[in-house]
Amino acid sequence: MRIGLLTEGGYPYVSGDARLWCDRLVRGLGQHEFDLYALSRSERQEDEGWLPLPPQVSRVRTAPLWTARDDGVGYGRRARRRFSECYGELAAVICGSGASTGTPAAEADRFRNALYGLAELARDEGGLVGALRSEGAVRALERACRAPGATRTAREARVPDLLTVATHLERALRPLSLDWYEDDSLGAVDLCHATSGGPAALPALLARHFSGVPLLLTEYGVRLRTHHLAATDAPPAVRSLLAAFHGRLATEIYDRAAVVTPGNAHARRWQERCGADRAKIRTVYPGMDASPFAEVGESTEGADPCTLMWVGRVEPAKDLVSLLHAFAEIRRDEPKARLRIVGVPAGPEGEAYLGHCRALAAQLFPDEAEGPHSVGDNPVSFEEIGGPELPTLADAYAAGAVTLLSSVVEGFPVSLVEAMFCGRATVSTDVGAVVEIIGGTGLVVPPRNPQAFAEACVALLRDPERRARLGAAARARALELFTVEQNVTAFHSIYLEIVSRTPVRRVVLDGAGEPRPFAAPAEAHVPGRWTDTTTRVVARGGPSWAGGTPVRATTPLPAAEGAR
């Protein structure tokens, strides 16, 4: 099978989202052929280069999402009219204006027709960059905001708001101008697998529209949710219009996808709320490599029974402030307890947050000394992986009896699964997919509740048998649900399921012009000899397969195949 894997800001780049699970998926499915179509997020990401690619990757095509140069295409009068009609309709839908029945299905059709109309214009006339940046695009937005039926927030939009929205739409619609949709590119694959929603799924939508290629959408973090959380500082009119656009785009992607695979039930609930059909959804947990943690997980040596470990990226969403206040409560009941915070700050915001946490720890826990002539030791330490005490990530989890997660916002808690691989008991806040991941193998408390967090930690510190029992159960659960092997097996089955339900998009003809059913089954696509030199392949559809110039195969068919 030939898979078109579409990524945004991730694989095959060294840095970025989803690069690890995509790499493991591609390497685990060596029987298939992969074409990578990657959208980069920054010039720095492109300069950092790619991960080493396995031999089953036959093609890599990239495009920058962070910039787009005007290709200099000048639209004629007819093309300008087409753009004005399609972009104006798109603007009218996100503003809530224009003539329509007002039903969700009718609005979805309007958005769909406008989106694919712009894509067809880009394919026929050239890129849309210049048109999307033009004054005409801003004026179309303004007309839509002032038209009858527009929402109140849209009517309140001012010129700076309209310029901001137009700029965002130009960036989001850049994939429409790519040259990826011909029969020798995405049109030639058997299945498009988009690794996230939003811009990464747009090329898959167009491959489905132009060539009938089925779409599989995987979301480990729901893009629409991410947009809502990230747009809080924008003016109300901007937030409203962009939320409407991304909501419409998400609805179209979910509607056109053959299968949608969230990474957990938390993401699944978001997708269902945003319009995904429950019958299309298959939950597939991210595949993680358990081998680095096998030695710690199988070891019979006990960790320091008084040490609590926190491992992760240091940023405000991890709520280390509440963790430090909870540890102050723990120290009152367990004076020998220690807290080791292991991680690196996430960007400038993380650096500032780490400094704040260090200062708070120094204030809450003055250095303690056993006597007047000894040096004090703070029970809270801030460390990083790679030092002499914690050379590897597995060593960090092995150093403590209990692993902690104190986040207020969390998607799929990777550090929690790593601790489970190591056979560690855990105390976590009830956010994101935590309860789903933990099951009954750890303690879960409300977020931003230091008292409850402290009580759960003290309960485990005082009960070593319970810690051991929970740790063993956690390791067994993680090995059953969250390994690379289960992830690869699940996607392999989904690939076959989708292709088995997809009509054959090309008809293979013999020398006499007669169709040969099953001559080129998509589910068995491998590089090699499938068709005879007298065989020709034409696209399904049209008045007859005799019309037009056929595409002739160039490799001979084995004798056994030719006899069928």
Image (cartoon, grey):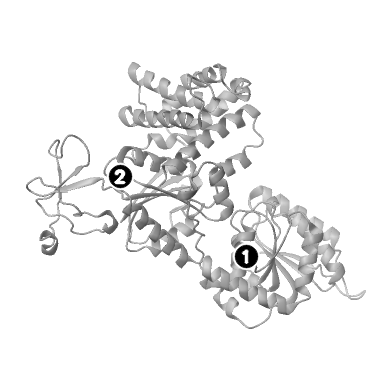
Say if 412 sits above or below 542 in the image.
below
Residue bearing the label numbered 1: 439
Quarter of the image for the C terminus: give it: bottom left
Q: Is residue 149 visible?
A: yes
Nearest to the observer: residue 557 or residue 279: 279
Residue 309 rendering spot, x and y as whole percentages: 70, 67
Question: Which residue corresponds to the image point at 14% horizontal and 61% vertical from the top-left?
Answer: 561
Q: For the residue carrying disc 1, how many other residues have a C-alpha within 10 Å: few (<14), some (14-19), or many (20+)?
A: few
Say if 193 sits above or below 418 in the image.
above
Nearest to the observer: residue 407 or residue 463: 463
Amino acid type of the residue that numbered disc 1 sits on in the rendered structure: Gly
Quarter of the image for the N terminus: give it: bottom left
Q: Residue 146's quadrant in the figure? A: top right
Judge from the rendering whether residue 169 lies leftward or rightward of residue 63; answer left or right: right
Judge from the rendering whether residue 356 lies leftward or rightward of residue 391; answer left or right: right
Residue 390 rendering spot, x and y as whole percentages: 64, 71
Residue bearing the label numbered 2: 185
Residue 36 rendering spot, x and y as whole percentages: 37, 51
Residue 142 rendering spot, x and y as whole percentages: 54, 19
**Label 2 residue SS:** loop
First-in-chain label (1 vs 2): 2
Question: Which residue corresponds to the image point at 76% horizontal and 59% vertical from the top-left?
Answer: 323
Judge from the rendering whether residue 493 lies leftward or rightward of residue 405; answer left or right: left
Q: Nearer the viewer, mark 1 or mark 2?
A: 1
Give the spatial CA distance, label 1 vs label 2: 43 Å
Residue 121 disc label: none
Judge from the rendering whether residue 27 lies leftward or rightward of residue 394; answer left or right: left
Question: Which residue corresponds to the image point at 42% horizontal and 64% vertical from the top-left?
Answer: 489
Nearest to the observer: residue 430 or residue 109: 109
Say if 477 sits above or below 447 in the image.
below
